[in-house]
Image (cartoon, grey):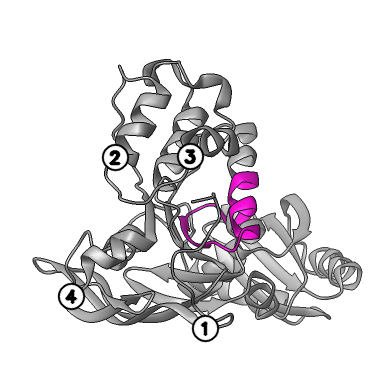
Amino acid sequence: MAVGEVLFQVAENQAIIAVDGLVKRYGTHTAVNGISFEVMQGEVFGLLGPNGAGKTTTMEMIEGLRLPDGGTAKVAGFDTRKDLKKIKEVIGVQLQSTSLFDLLKVSEIAQMYASFYTKTVPIGPLLEDVLLKEKLNDRVKNLSGGQKQRLAIALALVNDPQIIFLDEPTTGLDPQARRTLWDIILRLKERGKTIVLSTHYMDEAHILCDRICLMDRGEIVALDTPRNLVLNLQSDSAIEFRVPAQETGSTIEKQNLLKQLRAINDVKQVDIRKDVFVLYTDNLQNALLGLIQEAAAQSIQFADLQTRTATLEDVFIHMTGRSLREE
């Protein structure tokens, strides 16, 4: 069977994964709290959130690796509780920590994984697709971090899956290795594969994902396209600056400053993150001019002033009050 050939057909624009009310508890801690969503055929669907948001637990329940305490998940029409054997035929999984046999050669470990399935793709072209053709006879222990991640993805593709799960595939990689993996993921999408990707990198989610499910503390806080999520801020640009602690020492002083900032022309909203103030606007020039005028009139001293485009990080912080990078 050729790489990219689909084993099971799902109509275009139809949900290939349906999650309904999934719950997972560990003692008194609820890791996933009744979430529901659908993943469409052929899309890259991102689970985005900080560590501990419930991304990995959610993926493991959909993959059938972890039994939910409530709710259901269906993959290509199969129920994860009843049809696990059939689900294994249509999915490929790259775990957050894939254990590889260091002393095996790349070709040997690929052949070993292929032996687990009745239907597989040719190993040579598969390894060539993930840029490991020249490493066929190298031992796994001699591969770089990026090469090991590409090998982990290749092993998830040996059965030519219809749906591929990638759990934080680029964590710990250097920028060049990350972008190489991005190219591989986009090529898989071009072949019609459905990809479920978890990450806490906002740039990665923005570039790769057709839709993003923002998760925090086991719940979904937003689900939409990257563009629409940012548009929901109703602002294209952000102005960031710090104000010395002595000028905002009390809660009353801080609230007064926030009130003054919100009154500036063309400022849509204002957030404060520790000692950093963020102003959102659709008219950067007017808002910046208004800030400078207000600072002069009120004798406000600020530092580290910078302007930038609004991002998914801004969306997440606005909705949850915490950063995507927080533990």
Callout 2 environment at 10 Å: few (<14), some (14 to 19), or many (20+)?
few
Cα separation, mark 4 vs mark 2, equals 24 Å
Q: Which numbered disc flags the more N-terminal residue, 1 or 3?
A: 1
Q: Nearer the viewer, mark 4 or mark 3?
A: 3
Say the numbered circle drawn on residue 14.
Answer: 1
Question: Would you name the residue on which mark 4 appears?
Answer: 82
In the drawing, does residue 204 fall left or right of residue 294? left
In the image, residue 241 sits, relative to residue 294, either above or below, namely above
Residue identified by numbered label 3:
122
Say if residue 201 shows up in the picture: yes
Per the image, the residue denoted by label 2 is: 115
- The percent coordinates of residue 150 (x first, y second) are 50, 36
N-terminal-most mark, 1 or 4: 1
Position of residue 117 measured from the top left corner of the image (x, y, whole percent): 30, 48
- The image position of residue 105, as x and y in percent, is 38, 19
Q: Start and end of the magenta stretch?
A: 182-203
Task: Determine the residue positioned at 27% across, 67% down.
Answer: 86
Tell me which residue sits at (30%, 16%) in the image. Answer: 103
Element assignment for label 1: loop
Contact (CB < 8 A) between labels 1 and 3?
no
Circles 2 and 3, Cβ within 8 Å, touching? The answer is no
Q: Earlier in the sequence, mark 4 or mark 3?
A: 4
Residue placed most toward the observer, 100 or 281: 100
Distance in Å between CA atoms under marks 2 and 3: 12 Å
Q: Amino acid at mark 3?
A: Pro
Q: Amino acid at mark 2?
A: Ser
